[in-house]
Image: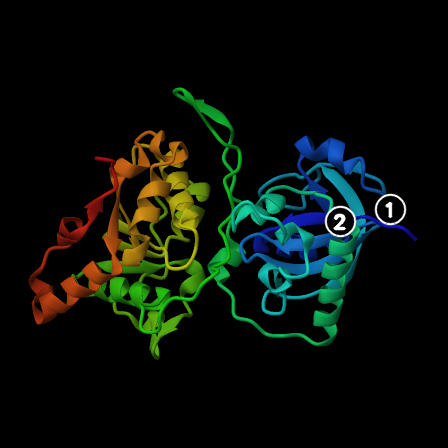
Amino acid sequence: MSRNYWLDLFTGKTWEEFLQHGADVSGFRERRRNTCEKVKPGDYFLCYLTGLSRFIGVLEIKSKMFIDSSPIWEGEAFPCRFKVNLIYQLDPKTAIPILELSKQLSIFKNLKSKHAWTGFFRRSPALFTVDDGETVTRAISAAVTHPVMREYDEKKYWRRPRTFESKKVGAVTVPEEVPDELPELTNRKTGDASHEEIQWLLLKLGSDLGLDVWVARNDRNREYKGKFFQKIPSLRKELPRQFDDATNRTIELIDVLWLQGDAIVAAFEVEHTSSIYSGLLRMSDLVSMQPNIKLNLYLVAPDDRRDKVFNEINRPTFAHLKPPLPKICKFISYSQLKSEIETMGSRIKFVKPEFIDGIAESCEPD
Protein backbone atom coordinates (compact mmCIF):
# COMPACT_ATOMS: atom_id res chain seq x y z
CA MET A 1 0.00 0.00 0.00
CA SER A 2 1.30 3.45 -0.92
CA ARG A 3 1.56 5.74 2.09
CA ASN A 4 2.83 9.18 2.92
CA TYR A 5 5.01 10.09 5.88
CA TRP A 6 4.28 13.23 7.90
CA LEU A 7 6.17 15.10 10.59
CA ASP A 8 4.41 15.26 13.98
CA LEU A 9 6.11 17.66 16.41
CA PHE A 10 6.02 17.17 20.17
CA THR A 11 7.72 18.63 23.20
CA GLY A 12 8.43 16.15 25.98
CA LYS A 13 5.44 17.58 27.82
CA THR A 14 2.97 17.18 24.93
CA TRP A 15 4.36 13.69 24.22
CA GLU A 16 3.77 12.63 27.82
CA GLU A 17 0.24 14.08 27.69
CA PHE A 18 -0.37 12.18 24.44
CA LEU A 19 0.72 8.92 26.10
CA GLN A 20 -1.26 9.57 29.28
CA HIS A 21 -4.42 10.15 27.24
CA GLY A 22 -4.09 6.72 25.64
CA ALA A 23 -1.81 7.46 22.66
CA ASP A 24 -4.73 7.13 20.24
CA VAL A 25 -5.32 10.77 19.19
CA SER A 26 -2.83 13.23 17.70
CA GLY A 27 -3.71 16.86 17.00
CA PHE A 28 -2.51 20.00 15.24
CA ARG A 29 -3.23 23.72 15.29
CA GLU A 30 -6.23 25.14 13.44
CA ARG A 31 -4.00 27.08 11.04
CA ARG A 32 -2.64 23.74 9.73
CA ARG A 33 -6.12 22.58 8.74
CA ASN A 34 -5.55 22.72 4.97
CA THR A 35 -2.46 20.52 5.29
CA CYS A 36 -4.22 18.16 7.71
CA GLU A 37 -6.95 17.58 5.12
CA LYS A 38 -4.30 16.00 2.84
CA VAL A 39 -3.41 13.34 5.42
CA LYS A 40 -5.19 10.03 4.85
CA PRO A 41 -5.76 6.81 6.81
CA GLY A 42 -2.80 4.45 6.43
CA ASP A 43 -0.24 7.29 6.36
CA TYR A 44 2.38 7.50 9.13
CA PHE A 45 3.15 10.31 11.55
CA LEU A 46 6.85 10.38 12.48
CA CYS A 47 7.05 11.81 16.00
CA TYR A 48 9.86 14.30 16.68
CA LEU A 49 10.83 15.91 20.00
CA THR A 50 11.62 19.57 19.35
CA GLY A 51 13.50 20.14 22.61
CA LEU A 52 15.86 17.20 22.08
CA SER A 53 15.84 17.09 18.25
CA ARG A 54 15.14 13.34 18.34
CA PHE A 55 12.65 10.96 16.74
CA ILE A 56 10.65 9.12 19.41
CA GLY A 57 7.87 7.18 17.69
CA VAL A 58 5.74 6.25 14.69
CA LEU A 59 1.94 6.54 14.53
CA GLU A 60 -0.30 4.90 11.95
CA ILE A 61 -3.20 7.18 11.02
CA LYS A 62 -6.56 5.44 11.43
CA SER A 63 -9.04 8.18 10.45
CA LYS A 64 -9.55 11.28 8.37
CA MET A 65 -9.11 14.62 10.12
CA PHE A 66 -11.86 15.65 12.51
CA ILE A 67 -12.30 18.76 14.66
CA ASP A 68 -12.37 18.32 18.42
CA SER A 69 -11.24 20.66 21.21
CA SER A 70 -11.88 18.39 24.18
CA PRO A 71 -8.98 18.47 26.69
CA ILE A 72 -5.93 16.33 25.95
CA TRP A 73 -3.07 18.82 26.11
CA GLU A 74 -2.76 21.42 28.85
CA GLY A 75 -1.21 24.20 26.78
CA GLU A 76 -3.35 24.17 23.61
CA ALA A 77 -6.35 22.37 22.15
CA PHE A 78 -4.72 21.22 18.85
CA PRO A 79 -8.23 20.78 17.39
CA CYS A 80 -7.33 19.26 13.98
CA ARG A 81 -7.19 15.67 15.14
CA PHE A 82 -6.68 12.11 13.91
CA LYS A 83 -7.27 8.70 15.40
CA VAL A 84 -3.88 6.96 15.50
CA ASN A 85 -2.21 3.73 16.50
CA LEU A 86 1.21 3.89 18.19
CA ILE A 87 3.21 1.24 16.33
CA TYR A 88 6.78 2.11 17.43
CA GLN A 89 7.63 3.87 20.69
CA LEU A 90 11.00 4.92 22.12
CA ASP A 91 11.76 6.93 25.25
CA PRO A 92 13.85 10.11 25.59
CA LYS A 93 17.07 8.14 26.17
CA THR A 94 16.60 5.76 23.22
CA ALA A 95 15.06 8.32 20.85
CA ILE A 96 17.14 8.88 17.70
CA PRO A 97 19.00 12.21 17.30
CA ILE A 98 18.19 13.71 13.91
CA LEU A 99 21.87 14.36 13.20
CA GLU A 100 22.62 10.63 13.34
CA LEU A 101 20.51 10.28 10.19
CA SER A 102 21.90 13.35 8.41
CA LYS A 103 23.88 11.37 5.81
CA GLN A 104 20.79 9.38 4.84
CA LEU A 105 18.11 12.11 4.61
CA SER A 106 17.50 14.39 1.63
CA ILE A 107 16.65 17.36 3.88
CA PHE A 108 20.39 17.61 4.65
CA LYS A 109 21.46 17.79 1.00
CA ASN A 110 22.36 20.97 -0.91
CA LEU A 111 21.93 23.18 2.14
CA LYS A 112 22.46 26.92 1.71
CA SER A 113 23.66 27.07 5.34
CA LYS A 114 24.56 24.35 7.84
CA HIS A 115 21.35 24.91 9.85
CA ALA A 116 18.98 25.28 6.89
CA TRP A 117 17.56 21.77 7.50
CA THR A 118 15.89 23.04 10.69
CA GLY A 119 13.29 24.88 8.60
CA PHE A 120 11.54 21.58 7.94
CA PHE A 121 11.02 21.09 11.68
CA ARG A 122 9.28 24.41 12.39
CA ARG A 123 5.67 23.22 11.97
CA SER A 124 3.67 20.06 11.52
CA PRO A 125 2.28 18.18 9.80
CA ALA A 126 4.91 18.45 7.06
CA LEU A 127 5.40 15.91 4.28
CA PHE A 128 8.60 13.85 4.11
CA THR A 129 9.78 12.34 0.86
CA VAL A 130 8.91 8.65 0.76
CA ASP A 131 12.60 7.70 0.95
CA ASP A 132 13.17 9.92 3.99
CA GLY A 133 10.02 8.64 5.67
CA GLU A 134 11.01 5.03 5.16
CA THR A 135 14.53 5.73 6.42
CA VAL A 136 13.28 7.30 9.64
CA THR A 137 10.70 4.53 10.17
CA ARG A 138 13.33 1.80 9.73
CA ALA A 139 15.67 3.58 12.15
CA ILE A 140 12.96 3.87 14.81
CA SER A 141 11.94 0.24 14.34
CA ALA A 142 15.57 -0.90 14.69
CA ALA A 143 15.99 1.24 17.83
CA VAL A 144 13.00 -0.49 19.43
CA THR A 145 14.72 -3.87 18.92
CA HIS A 146 18.28 -2.70 19.61
CA PRO A 147 18.05 0.47 21.76
CA VAL A 148 21.03 2.75 22.28
CA MET A 149 20.98 4.75 25.50
CA ARG A 150 21.88 8.45 25.24
CA GLU A 151 21.80 11.09 27.95
CA TYR A 152 19.41 14.00 27.52
CA ASP A 153 18.61 17.35 29.10
CA GLU A 154 15.41 16.97 31.13
CA LYS A 155 14.80 20.71 31.09
CA LYS A 156 14.68 20.68 27.29
CA TYR A 157 12.45 17.62 27.37
CA TRP A 158 9.89 19.14 29.73
CA ARG A 159 9.93 22.66 28.34
CA ARG A 160 6.72 24.37 27.24
CA PRO A 161 6.22 24.81 23.47
CA ARG A 162 8.10 27.90 22.39
CA THR A 163 5.44 30.16 20.95
CA PHE A 164 4.50 33.80 21.17
CA GLU A 165 1.16 35.29 20.31
CA SER A 166 1.61 37.21 17.11
CA LYS A 167 1.26 40.90 17.85
CA LYS A 168 2.40 44.33 16.81
CA VAL A 169 5.01 45.98 19.02
CA GLY A 170 5.58 49.44 17.61
CA ALA A 171 6.55 48.90 13.97
CA VAL A 172 7.63 45.30 14.57
CA THR A 173 5.53 42.14 14.49
CA VAL A 174 6.59 39.67 17.15
CA PRO A 175 6.58 36.24 15.49
CA GLU A 176 4.16 33.52 16.48
CA GLU A 177 6.99 31.03 16.72
CA VAL A 178 10.74 31.36 17.10
CA PRO A 179 13.34 28.87 15.88
CA ASP A 180 13.86 25.80 17.98
CA GLU A 181 17.24 25.43 19.61
CA LEU A 182 19.74 23.63 17.41
CA PRO A 183 21.57 20.43 18.25
CA GLU A 184 25.19 21.14 19.09
CA LEU A 185 27.31 20.27 16.05
CA THR A 186 30.71 20.54 17.70
CA ASN A 187 32.10 19.55 21.07
CA ARG A 188 33.71 22.02 23.40
CA LYS A 189 37.35 21.64 24.32
CA THR A 190 38.22 19.33 27.18
CA GLY A 191 38.54 21.35 30.35
CA ASP A 192 35.77 23.83 29.56
CA ALA A 193 33.27 24.39 32.35
CA SER A 194 30.06 22.38 32.20
CA HIS A 195 26.49 23.57 32.66
CA GLU A 196 26.35 21.67 35.97
CA GLU A 197 29.57 23.28 37.22
CA ILE A 198 28.27 26.80 36.59
CA GLN A 199 24.91 25.98 38.18
CA TRP A 200 26.75 24.58 41.22
CA LEU A 201 28.95 27.69 41.48
CA LEU A 202 25.94 30.03 41.31
CA LEU A 203 24.03 28.02 43.91
CA LYS A 204 26.97 27.85 46.30
CA LEU A 205 27.79 31.52 45.73
CA GLY A 206 24.25 32.58 46.60
CA SER A 207 24.24 30.38 49.67
CA ASP A 208 27.65 31.73 50.79
CA LEU A 209 26.29 35.25 50.41
CA GLY A 210 23.61 34.41 52.97
CA LEU A 211 20.75 34.07 50.49
CA ASP A 212 18.23 31.33 49.88
CA VAL A 213 18.71 29.67 46.50
CA TRP A 214 16.57 27.77 44.01
CA VAL A 215 17.60 25.39 41.25
CA ALA A 216 15.34 24.66 38.26
CA ARG A 217 12.68 22.12 39.20
CA ASN A 218 13.96 19.58 36.67
CA ASP A 219 17.57 19.93 37.85
CA ARG A 220 17.10 19.20 41.54
CA ASN A 221 18.63 15.72 41.31
CA ARG A 222 21.74 16.84 39.45
CA GLU A 223 25.26 16.97 40.82
CA TYR A 224 28.71 18.29 39.97
CA LYS A 225 31.62 15.97 40.71
CA GLY A 226 29.68 14.19 43.43
CA LYS A 227 28.36 17.42 44.97
CA PHE A 228 24.60 17.11 44.86
CA PHE A 229 22.56 20.25 44.30
CA GLN A 230 20.10 19.18 46.98
CA LYS A 231 22.90 19.34 49.59
CA ILE A 232 23.43 23.08 49.04
CA PRO A 233 22.70 24.95 52.30
CA SER A 234 19.61 27.16 52.08
CA LEU A 235 18.28 25.47 48.93
CA ARG A 236 14.56 26.23 48.80
CA LYS A 237 12.11 23.39 48.23
CA GLU A 238 9.27 25.73 47.30
CA LEU A 239 9.07 29.19 45.78
CA PRO A 240 6.93 31.99 47.24
CA ARG A 241 3.51 31.91 45.58
CA GLN A 242 3.31 35.61 44.83
CA PHE A 243 2.53 35.25 41.11
CA ASP A 244 -0.14 33.52 39.06
CA ASP A 245 0.30 29.85 38.10
CA ALA A 246 1.60 30.57 34.59
CA THR A 247 4.29 32.91 35.92
CA ASN A 248 5.27 30.45 38.63
CA ARG A 249 5.68 27.65 36.08
CA THR A 250 8.08 29.84 34.12
CA ILE A 251 10.05 30.92 37.20
CA GLU A 252 10.39 27.33 38.44
CA LEU A 253 12.35 26.40 35.28
CA ILE A 254 14.93 29.20 35.54
CA ASP A 255 18.36 27.63 36.15
CA VAL A 256 19.25 29.43 39.40
CA LEU A 257 17.45 31.98 41.58
CA TRP A 258 18.74 33.95 44.55
CA LEU A 259 16.10 34.90 47.13
CA GLN A 260 15.99 37.13 50.17
CA GLY A 261 12.90 36.23 52.13
CA ASP A 262 10.09 36.05 49.58
CA ALA A 263 11.83 38.42 47.17
CA ILE A 264 13.72 37.07 44.16
CA VAL A 265 16.84 39.23 43.94
CA ALA A 266 18.53 37.62 40.91
CA ALA A 267 17.72 35.07 38.19
CA PHE A 268 20.39 33.25 36.19
CA GLU A 269 20.07 31.27 32.96
CA VAL A 270 23.13 29.19 32.07
CA GLU A 271 23.46 28.78 28.29
CA HIS A 272 26.11 26.17 27.59
CA THR A 273 25.42 24.33 24.32
CA SER A 274 21.95 25.46 23.24
CA SER A 275 21.21 28.21 20.73
CA ILE A 276 20.65 30.75 23.55
CA TYR A 277 16.89 30.76 22.92
CA SER A 278 15.88 28.58 25.87
CA GLY A 279 16.97 31.05 28.55
CA LEU A 280 15.93 34.14 26.61
CA LEU A 281 12.44 32.76 26.06
CA ARG A 282 11.93 31.99 29.73
CA MET A 283 13.04 35.50 30.60
CA SER A 284 10.92 37.11 27.89
CA ASP A 285 7.91 35.08 29.04
CA LEU A 286 8.50 36.39 32.53
CA VAL A 287 8.73 40.00 31.35
CA SER A 288 5.60 39.60 29.18
CA MET A 289 3.57 38.15 32.05
CA GLN A 290 4.93 40.48 34.74
CA PRO A 291 6.07 43.73 33.02
CA ASN A 292 6.41 45.54 36.36
CA ILE A 293 8.51 42.87 38.03
CA LYS A 294 11.70 44.18 39.63
CA LEU A 295 14.23 41.45 39.05
CA ASN A 296 17.89 41.31 38.01
CA LEU A 297 18.26 38.90 35.08
CA TYR A 298 21.55 37.38 33.96
CA LEU A 299 22.60 35.14 31.07
CA VAL A 300 25.73 33.18 32.00
CA ALA A 301 27.58 31.63 29.06
CA PRO A 302 31.03 30.60 27.83
CA ASP A 303 33.27 33.48 26.79
CA ASP A 304 33.20 32.43 23.14
CA ARG A 305 29.39 32.73 23.08
CA ARG A 306 29.32 36.39 24.12
CA ASP A 307 28.66 37.70 20.60
CA LYS A 308 25.87 35.16 20.07
CA VAL A 309 24.21 36.19 23.33
CA PHE A 310 24.31 39.87 22.31
CA ASN A 311 23.02 39.15 18.80
CA GLU A 312 20.11 37.04 20.01
CA ILE A 313 18.99 39.23 22.89
CA ASN A 314 18.86 42.26 20.59
CA ARG A 315 16.50 40.62 18.10
CA PRO A 316 13.25 42.63 17.72
CA THR A 317 11.36 39.81 19.46
CA PHE A 318 13.19 40.60 22.70
CA ALA A 319 14.33 44.20 22.18
CA HIS A 320 10.76 45.48 21.74
CA LEU A 321 9.37 44.02 24.93
CA LYS A 322 8.31 46.50 27.58
CA PRO A 323 10.73 46.82 29.27
CA PRO A 324 13.23 45.75 26.58
CA LEU A 325 15.01 42.53 27.54
CA PRO A 326 18.52 43.90 26.65
CA LYS A 327 17.92 46.69 29.17
CA ILE A 328 17.14 44.42 32.15
CA CYS A 329 19.16 41.30 31.32
CA LYS A 330 22.96 41.30 31.57
CA PHE A 331 25.73 38.95 30.47
CA ILE A 332 28.26 37.16 32.68
CA SER A 333 31.01 35.06 31.14
CA TYR A 334 32.11 31.78 32.67
CA SER A 335 35.66 33.07 33.13
CA GLN A 336 34.52 36.27 34.85
CA LEU A 337 32.31 34.38 37.29
CA LYS A 338 34.97 31.82 38.17
CA SER A 339 37.66 34.49 38.50
CA GLU A 340 35.56 36.60 40.88
CA ILE A 341 34.72 33.61 43.08
CA GLU A 342 38.39 32.62 43.26
CA THR A 343 39.48 36.18 44.06
CA MET A 344 36.97 36.57 46.90
CA GLY A 345 37.95 33.32 48.57
CA SER A 346 37.05 33.29 52.27
CA ARG A 347 36.05 36.98 52.15
CA ILE A 348 32.85 36.02 50.35
CA LYS A 349 30.76 36.08 53.54
CA PHE A 350 31.47 39.83 53.84
CA VAL A 351 30.41 40.60 50.27
CA LYS A 352 26.96 41.99 49.44
CA PRO A 353 24.85 40.22 46.79
CA GLU A 354 24.80 43.39 44.69
CA PHE A 355 28.41 42.69 43.67
CA ILE A 356 27.11 40.36 40.94
CA ASP A 357 25.76 43.33 39.00
CA GLY A 358 29.20 44.88 39.00
CA ILE A 359 30.77 41.96 37.15
CA ALA A 360 27.92 41.68 34.64
CA GLU A 361 28.00 43.34 31.23
CA SER A 362 25.09 45.31 29.79
CA CYS A 363 23.49 43.71 26.72
CA GLU A 364 22.27 47.01 25.30
CA PRO A 365 23.85 47.97 21.96
CA ASP A 366 26.41 50.75 22.01
Dot 2 crowding, Cα within 10 Å, few <14, some 14–19, many 20+: some
Q: Position of residue 282 (x, y in %)?
A: 41, 45
For disc 1, the marked residue is 41
The answer to whether marks 2 and 1 mark residues whose Cβ atoms lie closer than 8 Å is: no
Q: Quadrant of residue 289?
A: top left
For disc 2, the marked residue is 129
* Secondary structure under the numbered disc 1 in the rendered image: loop
Q: Position of residue 324 (x, y in %)?
A: 31, 33
**Residue drawn 25% across and 56% down?**
333
Q: Position of residue 294 (x, y in %)?
A: 25, 39
Is 319 placed above or below 117 here?
above
Q: Quadrant of residue 52?
A: bottom right
State which mark lies toward you, 2 or 1: 2
Residue 22's disc number: none
> In the rendered view, does 28 fall on the left or right side of 203?
right
> In the rendered view, does 263 fall on the left or right side of 3?
left
Q: Position of residue 53 (x, y in %)?
A: 57, 56
Amino acid, disc 2: Thr
Amino acid, disc 1: Pro
Q: Quadrant of the C terminus?
A: top left
